[in-house]
């Protein structure tokens, strides 16, 4: 089989490896699609990972093609995405089924080899089964969708709420989608014209962050937002998230900070005076109460939100360099980029052929 193996920062090599054998309670997944996350961009182009070489890729879906001993025979041939975190099942958090906060976890695509590969062995426990009607490429958006769903749950968004997402990335737009699904009015704030237009194309109201405070006041008649989401990871957007929340409202902190977060005194003061709830969110709930993966799979099956439109461009596994070059070109608006394999690769080649005609 073919894999994309990261040998050092910036050196992603397309190479061969033996197809692995599933062990006890493991399955062999024929990987059909794997998204490229912004964390992969950092891993491949800037920071590297825990060890070299490592096969990146943690946002994937595929078909179960082989079962190890002890697996439910009904799993064979099923479509599934995969919870990429491998919990220790020993620690306090794991005992409480809070697997995402496990003290000693492993992870596909960072600590362990991931799914920039044609096949991957995964524990049956980590499978998130998908309905047959869900395309593999949609299924590969399960991880960002589950993370977004979790943030909406943590923000306790409810029907009739006004919710503001600051950040127009894939997860930001998915947060807005789940807010809408809950019956809330979803607003998305960003800076780039193309990103805001893209958000509008999903039916979200948009706000330019350059004049966010005035716009929030204007659009809400001064009563501001019930829940705000910081999905950028910057000082400015955290300030904006706080200043856009109503008195007694909730600010959900989600963006991965690029540096220290510091707040001006008058902004901090608003947390106190407005009695805001500042709520963190981390990863997603899997095989536990409020399973975000099941919710994502249900939403994909329902088909109301056009998940596929979040995929800007698909690449063959042999086009790793090209994909990361495109990812790094910040002058272009983009949402998810995705590698496709097997039948999905054939489909891509056919699409390219068609577009050339
Ligand atoms: Zn990711
Ligand atoms: Zn644990």
Image (spheres, grey):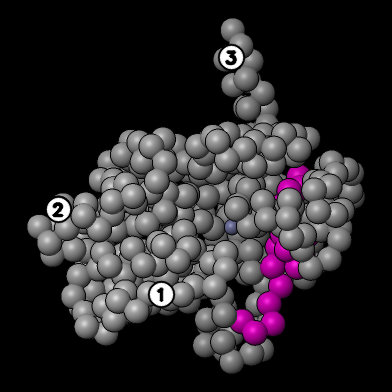
Q: Residue at x 40, y 46 (%)?
A: 191
- Relative image position of residue 234 (x, y in whole percent): 48, 63
Residue 110 inside the magenta-drawn segment:
yes
State the residue position of label 1: 263
Whether ligand 1 has any atom under 8 Å from the Cβ at mark 1 is answered as no
Q: Residue furthest bottom?
A: 92
How far is disc 3 from disc 1 in space, using C-alphas? Answer: 52 Å
348 and 216: which is toward the camera: 216
The circle on residue 354 is 3
Q: Residue furthest left?
A: 221
81 relative to 179 in the view: left or right: right
Q: Residue at x 60, y 53 (%)?
A: 38
- Relative image position of residue 5 (x, y in whole percent): 83, 50
Q: Earlier in the sequence, mark 3 or mark 2?
A: 2
User: Dots 3 and 1: beta carbons under 8 Å?
Assistant: no
- Pair 1/2: label in front: 1
Instruction: Report which quarter residue 51 is drawn in.
Output: bottom right
Instruction: Report which quarter residue 68 is drawn in.
Output: bottom right
Q: Residue at x 61, y 81 (%)?
A: 102
Tell me which segment is drawn in magenta: 102-118
The C terminus - image quarter: top right
Ligand 1 in which quarter: bottom right
177 and 126: which is toward the camera: 177
Q: Residue at x 33, y 63 (%)?
A: 240
20 relative to 304 in the view: left or right: right
User: Dots 1 and 2: beta carbons under 8 Å?
Assistant: no
Q: Identify the secondary structure beneath mark 1.
A: loop
Q: Identify the secondary structure beneath mark 2.
A: helix
């Amino acid at each position: 089989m073919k894999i994309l193996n990261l040998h050092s920062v910036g050196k992603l090599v397309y190479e061969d490896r033996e197809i692995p054998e599933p062990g006890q309670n493991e399955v062999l997944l024929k990987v059909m699609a794997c998204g490229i996350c912004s964390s992969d961009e950092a891993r491949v182009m800037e920071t590297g990972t825990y060890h070299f070489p490592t096969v990146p890729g943690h946002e994937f879906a595929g078909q179960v093609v082989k079962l190890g001993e002890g697996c439910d025979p009904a799993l064979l041939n099923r479509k599934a995405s995969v919870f990429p975190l491998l919990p220790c099942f020993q620690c306090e958090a794991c005992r409480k089924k809070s697997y995402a906060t496990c003290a000693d976890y492993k992870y596909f695509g960072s600590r362990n080899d991931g799914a920039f590969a044609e096949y991957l062995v995964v524990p049956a426990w980590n499978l998130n089964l998908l309905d047959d009607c869900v395309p593999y490429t949609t299924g590969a958006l399960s991880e960002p969708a589950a993370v977004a769903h979790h943030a909406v749950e943590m923000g306790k968004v409810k029907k009739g709420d006004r919710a503001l997402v600051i950040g127009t990335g894939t997860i930001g737009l998915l947060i807005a989608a789940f807010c809408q699904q809950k019956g809330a009015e979803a607003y998305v704030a960003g800076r780039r014209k193309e990103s805001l237009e893209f958000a509008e194309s999903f039916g979200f109201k948009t706000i330019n962050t350059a004049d966010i405070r005035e716009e929030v006041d204007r659009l809400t008649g001064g009563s501001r937002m019930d829940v705000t989401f910081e999905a950028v990871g910057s000082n400015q957007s955290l300030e904006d998230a706080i200043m856009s929340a109503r008195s007694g409202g909730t600010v959900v902190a989600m963006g991965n900070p690029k540096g220290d977060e510091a707040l001006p005194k008058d902004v901090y003061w608003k947390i106190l005076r407005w009695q805001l709830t500042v709520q963190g969110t981390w990863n997603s709930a899997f095989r536990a109460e409020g399973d975000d993966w099941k919710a994502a799979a249900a939403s994909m099956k329902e088909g109301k939100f056009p998940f596929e439109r979040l995929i800007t461009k698909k690449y063959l596994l042999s086009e790793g360099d090209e994909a990361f070059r495109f990812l790094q070109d910040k002058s272009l608006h983009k949402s998810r980029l995705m590698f496709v394999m097997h039948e999905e690769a054939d489909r891509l080649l056919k699409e390219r052929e068609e577009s050339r005609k």
